[in-house]
Amino acid sequence: MTRFSAPVVLLGLILPLIAPSETTFAQDLPEPPRASFSNAETDLAARRALDYLAGAQQADGAWESGGFGKATSVTSLAVMAFLACGHVPGEDGPYREAIERGIAYVLDHQRPDGMLVSNTSHGPLYCHGISTLMLAEVVGMTPDPDLAARARNALAKAVELIVRAQQVPKSPDHAGGWRYQPGSYDSDLSVSGWQVVALRAARDAGCTVPSEAIDDALDYVRRCVEPRSGGFSYQAGRGGPNNPRTGTGILSLELCGEHASPEALAGGDYLMSHPPSWGSDYFFYEAYYCSQALFQLGDDYFLPYYRQLIPILLDHQDPDGSWFSTSGNDRTGGRNYCTAMGVLALAVEYRYLPIYQR
């Protein structure tokens, strides 16, 4: 029986930004429960970041990723940032055009084999998994039947590629996971996490996802647990645990029906003893994954972590509304990547994205 019963990417030419205004944000955000910080502050920070992203979009609908150029991954993260704050394609609003052009860019760059990628990155499955997730969220949110149909068709092809890539013969340590290329013979938790979340979102959007794909993926994720610490490693027995990897592992288990499993709870305890820290490697990757993962585990885990994360984000937002990491691989992803991930971390409690539901 399937356990799918529950509801880097390092990838910006920045254009002139749009001045923040009080009218450029969703007006009906869900109410409490909220963490113990100012709602007005966090809402303003998200609004300023969205205004920045709207101004940084390229004429063809793409967002650039640092030195990597235009990327479906960062474009998809930017689209999801708008969606996470209640802005929906097919509905009037200040960001409708930006959202719809971003979605069109991704759809226009699907290859015949189903791959969603617009550059020659060494890790196209990063781009593909993120873009598949975005399309699944669009299918679940847009009231536009034509857009939903086009996104659903592309989503089905994208899911088929993910499943095919998982079925490449691999050694026992790597079986069930994914790595950079569809034909890779090894796996890592970072790439695998995006595919798992994408499959869960696609399943929720009505796409056929084989139960065996989920079961095999969860077996791989559990093999990445580092028993002594409870954290999750980059690969089974390799790479050592850190916060981003642990958040990825917890979220994968939680979203696929393994709620409050021993592995997820041990990972949650690991994160409680390793608080977020500005300037750490993969800070924005951590902010994205760990906030979602601990939200799924429950408020006993989520609120203590989130109360530490939010002041860091508020204190380090640049005057133009963007974020940009001072070090680590996040910085190579570029300002658009950091900004989109910052919004997605802030917006967990808004609960607009289907993937953010408990």
Image: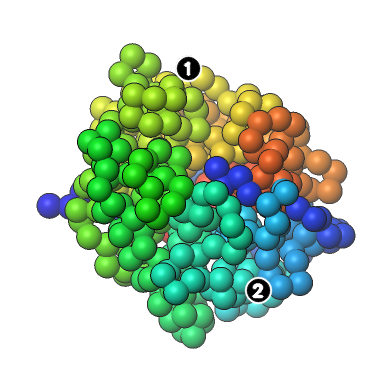
Q: Is residue 286 above or below residue 22?
A: above
Amino acid type, callout 1: Ser
Left or right of 28 on screen, residue 302: left
* Residue lying furthest top: 228
Q: Is residue 2 above or below residue 332?
A: below
Q: Position of residue 131 (x, y in %)?
A: 51, 61
Precedes in sequence: disc 2 or disc 1: 2
Q: Residue at x 56, y 39 (%)?
A: 285
Residue 260 location in percent, x, y?
28, 34
Specify few, some or many for label 1: CA neighbours under 10 Å numbering under 14, 14-19, or 20 or more.
Answer: few
Q: Name which residue lies at 40% across and 77% down.
A: 153
Horizontal relation, residue 127 to residue 230: left or right: right
Q: Are marks 2 and 1 in contact (CB under 8 Å)?
A: no
Foreground label between 2 and 1: 2
Residue 204 is drawn in which quadrant? Answer: bottom left
Residue type of the residue flagged with mark 2: Arg
- Total tally of numbered discs in the picture: 2
Q: Which residue is mark 2?
A: 101
Residue 197's place in the image compared with 152, above or below, is above
Mark 1 secondary-structure assignment:
loop
**Which disc, if any, is residue 273?**
1
Identified at 69% across, 70% down, the residue is 61
What residue is drawn where x is 27% and y is 43%?
A: 170
Q: Quick one: 355 or 167, which is closer to the camera?
A: 167
Q: In this view, which residue lies farthest toward the left? A: 1
Looking at this view, is 316 or 187 the one in front?
Answer: 187
Q: In the image, residue 212 lies at what x, y percent?
A: 19, 53
Q: Is residue 30 visible?
A: no
- The tag on residue 169 is none
Q: CA distance from mark 2 to mark 1?
A: 42 Å
